[in-house]
Image (spheres, rainbow, N blue to C red):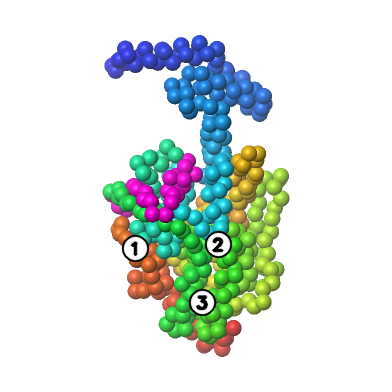
Amino acid sequence: MFMMPKLLRRCIVGFGVVGLASGVRAAPAAALAVSNDNPYVVMSLFAKVMETVRQHYVDPSQTDYRTMVTRALQGMVSSLDEFSEFLTPDDLKVMEEETEGRFGGIGVVVGVREGAIVVIAPMDDSPGQRAGLMPGDRLVEVDGHRTDQMSLQEVVRLMRGAPGTRVRLRIAREGSPELREVEIERADIHVDSVRDVRVMEGNIGYIRISQFDERTAELLDDALHELVRTNVVGLVLDLRSNPGGLLAAAVDVCARFLPRGTLVLTTEGRPSVPKQTFLTHGTPRIVQLPMVVLINEGSASAAEVVAGCLQDHGRAVLVGERSFGKGSVQTIIPLEDGYALRLTTARYFTPKRRMIHELGIEPDIRVPAPLREFEASPGAGGRRVDSRDVQLQRAVEVLRGVLAYGARSGARPK
């Protein structure tokens, strides 16, 4: 039989003595069950625990009231789901920088999946992308700090920093038995959300949207005008590794391809949160070219809204892999002293009432991307439009088939 060492037994007894000396007595389980929804009883327990920690925890520098309450609130809110957060003023500043599209760091969007911090998508032409990071990579350590002991915002803050400084990451990739350590130099990240506008062979246009921000619709208008002027006959809209962004920008993008008043999505939450319906609004010219939309596991949030909307309305064929499955609405609720809540208040539903959250959007034609080992990636993360991009090749083949069918039936692209 295993016997507990005397020293360990003394330590355990010692903890019991501290509990008795503090005057705190455990409430009976039945009493706690009855009082679950009584805020006064529950807050009394919270206050007693906080005071016990403040009096007896070994490191007093960790036990000032603001620190303890902030951490308690962070734990409470983050335990609801992987996207809800209690935001400090610094956290809020980081979020505002991301929305504006300019910040210092390595250019990688991260999130939580199954309790682990994972790469949702590296941003185009960013240090993280050039280092070979890919959607689904799991961040094990950042500068020697284990991420399984940190919140999402703590991980983001560690990766951010002044341009020219460096950060070390330990990465786990599915299918690779070994962890890989990479050192990445931070840079001033400026993201152009619409990029790589080109005309491919067969007079097919190509546009990549890397994220959805305040300028996406304006930049998309310029790109579409450029392509339509060259008389392209079809369009590939690339939303791969697009981590999302502003919902309003996603609705604006759909409005470039669908008639005014078309349903884009609905959001539904608790009865206290009104159901919202988002419709396209009028634009000077609706582009009616045959379309293929490319998606992969890094396509999330607003990117999934656009893909699901165009698929449900039969406006585009989706090619690639199932998307990430981030289909919930987070509302920023300001609090005093610069703090805020980022709280999940509703979930997205496509026009045909498909739920996106945790399910993702399934492509019409599934084309898995080739597995890649860890390597530095040239250009757009190894996704240059070349012979290696099997998903883009398939998208072009699909468009050619649509155009050939239209020609046989007498229909012409508008």
The residue shown at (52%, 44%) is 82
Does label 3 or label 2 sit earlier along the sequence? 2
Indicate yes or no whether the magenta region holds residue 1.
Answer: no
Q: Where is the C terminus found, in terms of image quarters?
A: bottom right
Q: Is residue 151 left or right of residue 73?
A: left
Q: Are marks 3 and 2 in contact (CB under 8 Å)?
A: no
> Given the image, on which type of amino acid does mark 3 rest?
Leu
What element does badge 2 sit on? Answer: loop
| Whether residue 335 is situated above or below residue 17 in the rendered picture | below
The residue shown at (53%, 49%) is 94
Local crowd at mark 2 within 10 Å, few (<14), some, or many (≥20)?
A: many
Q: Which residue is the site of mark 2?
A: 212
- For marks 1 and 2, give the CA distance: 23 Å
**Which picture quadrant has residue 276?**
bottom right
> Given the image, on which type of amino acid does mark 2 rest?
Phe
Q: How many marks?
A: 3
> Given the image, on which type of amino acid does mark 1 rest?
Ser
Query: Is 380 or 242 nearer to us in this picture?
Result: 380
Query: Is 105 or 271 nearer to us in this picture?
Result: 105
- For marks 3 and 2, give the CA distance: 19 Å
Image disc number at residue 235: 3
Image disc number at residue 261: none
Q: Is residue 413 left or right of residue 272?
A: left
Residue 363 appears in the rendering: no
Q: Which residue is the site of mark 1?
A: 377
* Mark whose residue sits in front, 3 or 2: 2
Residue extent of the magenta highlight: 151-177
Local crowd at mark 1 within 10 Å, few (<14), some, or many (≥20)?
A: some
Query: Is 86 or 187 nearer to us in this picture?
Result: 187
- For marks 3 and 1, give the CA distance: 26 Å
